[in-house]
Amino acid sequence: MWAIANGEPADRPPVSAWRHFPGQEDNATSLARAMLEFQDKYDWDYMKVNPRAVYYHEAWGNEYDYSRYNDVLPTRVKHRIHDSQDLHTLQELPGTAGPFGEQLESLRLIKSRTPKDLPIFQTIFTPIGVLANLCGLRSLGRYREAPREGSALIKMLAEDREGVHAALRAIATTLASYAAAVLETGVDGIFYAALGMARTGYFTRDEWDEFVKPYDLVVLEALKPGLMMLHTCGINGNPEWFVDYPIHILHWAESATGNPSLRDSTAWIGRKVPMG
């Protein structure tokens, strides 16, 4: 993995996989145990720590029922943002407290019980994806439909652009603080989940450049000098949109509809490493 990340010859491609752990992901100790057992069983070339996908949203007030899962997500019973006025109530949070502190503790446990040469990545979501979930939406990704019509997030972009920017600033600065604390645990880098927010037909490119990219960069700048892998999820994921991001590895689902092949990416990806 280190050879690949550094652009050096390797004996084979690095192999890893990840999954959610319903019933084991709601506290630091059980998540760490699940991740360590998964690593011990399969001996992956790198570990992508896969926390519950809702911990960011919990930090700002979403609530979930962990006794009832919908696929790999606990059932949401409350979301924070209902109208454009709520956008202005979102505040920057400490990146080391609440659900963020819990994840930092899990990382410390994992790091203390893994070989020093095992690359470990913590997952962090894009700010626009966090905001979408606070608006009551599910993260875009995989093969799930992503219509603009009826999207509470798209509606708020039209109703209160400044409110959306204010909310995204609060989220991005919080995640930047959290990202710096993540690297202080000794893990090697970040798996930056762009989710499916780059999906063709959801945001226009102008909306992307205004509401997505600037706030991604706030978080990514806080991650230097960590190793950064960015994943754009699902069909029509437009990995080309991320080619000028300050990342080392660009990761996408090569086999998903509308996505380019890894081999052909050499024509546009520059010095970044393509993975999928």
Image (spheres, rainbow, N blue to C red):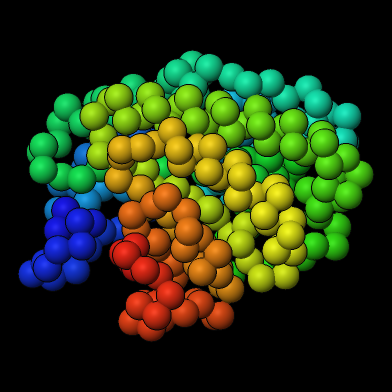
Q: Give the quadrant of the N terminus.
A: bottom left
- Left or right placement of residue 121 versus residue 87 in this view: left
Seen as rendered, the residue at the extreme right is: 159
| Residue 178 spot, x, y in % from top left | 46, 27
Residue 265 vertical placement versus 134 (above, below)? below
- In the image, 185 versus 113, the foreground residue is 185
**In the figure, is residue 190 to the left or right of 203?**
left
Q: Position of residue 70 (x, y in %)?
A: 59, 50
Q: Position of residue 33 (x, y in %)?
A: 26, 34
| Rendered view: 230 above or below 94 | below
Instruction: Point out the image quarter for the C terminus.
Output: bottom left
Question: Residue at position x 33%, y 54% from top?
Answer: 248
Residue 33 lies left or right of residue 115; in this view the side is: right
In this rendering, the answer to whether 48 lies above or below 67 is: below
Nearest the camera: 12 or 66?
12
Residue 33 visible, this orientation? no
Residue at point 48%, 59% (across, down): 244
x and y percent of residue 35 in the render? 28, 41
Residue 119 appears in view: yes
Measuring 31% from the left and 39% from the top, which residue is drawn there? 226
Q: Residue at x 45, y 18 (%)?
A: 96
In the picture, measured across the screen, residue 16 lies left or right of residue 42, that is right
Query: Compared with residue 143, is residue 102 higher up or lower down, i.e. above or below?
Result: above
